[in-house]
Amino acid sequence: MSALDQIGELLRLVPVQRAGIGLVLAALGLPVVGVVIVGLDIMPVRFAMMHVALLGIAVGELLGVDPVLCALLACAAAGAGVAPLARTPEALSGAMGLLMSLAIAAALLVLALSGVNANGAFALLWGSILAVRPSDLVVLGTLAVAVPALFVWRRRDLALLLHDRELAVCSGVPAQRLTMLLLVLVAVAVAGAIRLTGALLVDALTLLPALAARRLGRSLGAITLWAMGIGVLVNATGFLIALGWDLPPGPVLVLAAGAVALVAHLLPERGASSWRVLDAASHGGAPH
């Protein structure tokens, strides 16, 4: 059987169809979250939320509640909880380091004291793309609508906030509330991608498309569209390659996204470093 025939046969299966839909939905929301991560310079947030997600999973296993739901709630609460410390990237990085350490310690303690099989909890960190459920699609679908809608609705405010927090405050942007909302979205996005690629490979859906898009776009709007387009391309291509050659989807998605990001960074500079100012200027909010 050729690779194309194998892909055709597999696409008739409901779990494979759900996985494909999940990846498309993820490509519409999560790369935009990656734009936030890059813009706010909060790379440690991914690792902190992976550990918080593990704590939520452990609590879910202990209580007999959906572990992914518990991971979503735990990450959302953690994102909102660290927002008051987000006045500078340095303060937020320190808070994320503390949160990461406490979360993993608490997760291991819960697993040890409860007698819950730790293999099941850690398995979710690696992802199981064919185990995607309708409820997971609801979460990803919500993110696919809510995140781009936020960027359209508050585009000028976001451009100013991602450029300079103090400038945003002086311009009347509700920086504290907006930062809290962004952190909650980032946290929920990491938890929402658990079943697709696993928390450990979530960069394939969030950060890598955003890094490539930042090299290609000259404004916040352009970068957002590039990120979504690259996300769709990478997810669709990586998933089909994994199906056709019987490969694990998670690593293939990471390699595909990484290849696109590498190519983008080899292209001539297009002024990406000034995209925040350019976008703000187009909406009347840039400094002179």
Image (spheres, grey):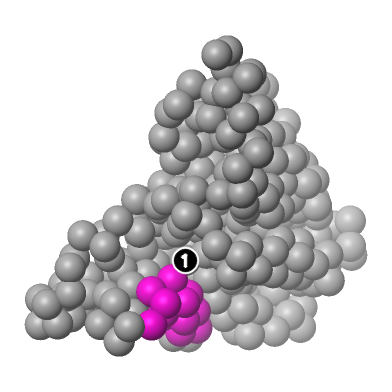
Left or right of residue 238, residue 29 in this image: right
Q: Which image quarter: residue 121? A: bottom left
Q: Which residues are magenta?
A: 65-80
Can residue 5 be seen by looking at this rendering? yes
Please tell me whether the stretch drawn in magenta is mainly helix, strand or loop.
helix
Can residue 40 be seen by looking at this rendering? no
Indicate whether 81 appears above or below 288.
below
Q: Residue at x 43, y 71 (%)?
A: 68
Left or right of residue 282, residue 124 in this image: left
Q: Position of residue 9 (x, y in %)?
A: 62, 30
Q: Position of residue 56 (x, y in %)?
A: 35, 77
Indicate whether 182 appears above or below 5.
below
Which of 188 and 5 lies nearest the eye of the viewer?
5
Which of 147 and 139 lies nearest the eye of the viewer?
139
Q: Residue at x 83, y 71 (%)?
A: 153
> Amino acid type of disc 1?
Ala
Left or right of residue 286, residue 95 in this image: left
Q: Position of residue 257 (x, y in %)?
A: 54, 34
Q: Residue furthest top?
A: 2
Q: SS of the residue at dot 1? A: helix
Q: Is residue 215 magenta?
A: no
Q: Residue at x 76, y 83 (%)?
A: 172
Q: Pointer 1: what residue?
A: 191
Q: Position of residue 51 (x, y in %)?
A: 31, 67
Q: Residue at x 43, y 28 (%)?
A: 247
Tell me how many marks there are: 1
Which of 165 and 191 lies nearest the eye of the viewer?
191
In the rendered image, the quadrant that contains the C terminus is: bottom right
